[in-house]
Image (tube, rainbow, N blue to C red):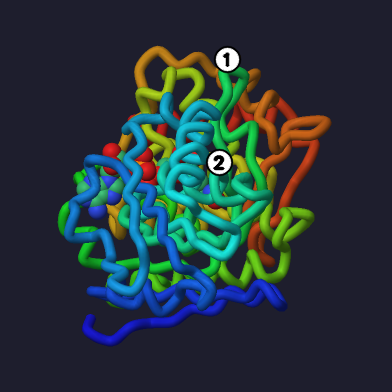
Amino acid sequence: MDEMNRVIVDLGDRTYSVVVGNGARSQTASLLPATARRVSIVTQSGIPRHLIPEFPDHVVTIHEIGIGEEFKSLSTILELCSAFAQAGMTRNDVVVGVGGGMVTDIAGFAAASYHRGIPVVHVATSLLAMIDAAVGGKTGVNIPEGKNLVGAYWQPYGVVCDLDALDTLPAREMRCGLGEMAKYHFIAREDLDQLPFPQRIARSVEIKAEIVSADEREGGVRALLNYGHTLAHAIEIETDFAMAHGEAVALGLLFAAHLAEAMGRIDADRVSEHYRVVHDVYGIELSLPQGLDNGRLIAAMGRDKKALESITFVLDSANGLEVVPGVSEADIRIALTAFTRRLS
Ligand SMILES: NC(=O)c1ccc[n+]([C@@H]2O[C@H](COP(=O)([O-])OP(=O)(O)OC[C@H]3O[C@@H](n4cnc5c(N)ncnc54)[C@H](O)[C@@H]3O)[C@@H](O)[C@H]2O)c1
């Protein structure tokens, strides 16, 4: 795809563009605030250098953060803020995060915190960051008590999704992005698989942009982005994160379909449509990790941060996805049995 797709995240005076296409990184400089004289790039050693945009008209410093969720921490934020100060960054300047969701979450939170908030532009290099993490303004870090427990909403000034980045993305990271992409089929109720892959990425960004524009702070429709995530979080915790997030989401989507069927919300054909998307369209044919206990999974789902009083799921229906509180343990057990049987 040579042409660029431009998706608008409509948030009044904080509206911004997401540029999607091969070579889109060359557009990054045009997204920076006009006031910026200095650019602090936040990236990781694993990100290929050719993906870092050039800013010939700015004073540029590059800061590498560690690889792995243990570096998604307040210490990393402190190190970055010190580095920004040493680079003479002012509130007129700009942070540019170049990397996957971990980098964009960290760069976003550091930018939100430094000088009480300076502009940030994201250059998303993983599929997951392109279609999810870099768009929407959720930033944050992990603390020992939980993932993403400390953070801020801080909308970027612009986002770049350079599809060239997917050429070097490791296969497992690609699969994680595809797991998240699968959820957009059900959120939008569209045959996204009819679109060529680059357009499907742009459409996924657009779906996320529409949801964020309608509900920036997750008071309503934004919760639908958590489709498949209740079981996914439980699997991640119970496997001590051996199963990656996007993989767990793919399983979570299938389980959510069984649960909706057990509750009489959808029929068997719609369950099969979930399998078609996850297995056939995206080729994610995973089984449940060995040794998972239904009781522990249910307990972990009950502790999910999205569950306020009882176990809450995002579930499909004839009218589309809905947030359903108060799901009974009996229905969850029926669905877990049907799910495990179909996967084996
Ligand atoms: N803010 C949000 O709304 C949101 C949404 C979903 C996920 N997240 C967060 O995103 C993070 C996961 O993001 P992720 O899946 O992108 O993982 P990641 O950022 O950890 O990247 C995975 C690995 O791929 C490497 N990588 C990235 N792009 C590459 C490329 N083009 N070529 C070669 N290697 C590349 C990275 O260096 C890293 O080692 C989590 O921390 C999660 O909490 C945030």
Q: Which disc, if any, is residue 296?
A: 1
Q: Earlier in the sequence, mark 1 or mark 2?
A: 2
- Where is the N terminus found, in terms of image quarters? bottom left
Residue 186 visible in the displayed image = no
Residue 136: image location, x then y, percent: 58, 60
Residue located 67% across and 57% down the image: 222
Q: Residue furthest right?
A: 309
Residue 65: image location, x then y, percent: 36, 37
Residue named by callout 2: 229
Residue located 24% across and 48% down the image: 47
Residue located 73% across and 50% down the image: 323
327 in relation to 277, above or below: above
- Where is the C terminus found, in terms of image quarters? top left
Mark 2 neighbour density, 10 Å: few (under 14) some (14–19) many (20 or more): many
Mark 1 neighbour density, 10 Å: few (under 14) some (14–19) many (20 or more): few
The number of discs equals: 2
State the residue in front, 17 or 203. Answer: 17
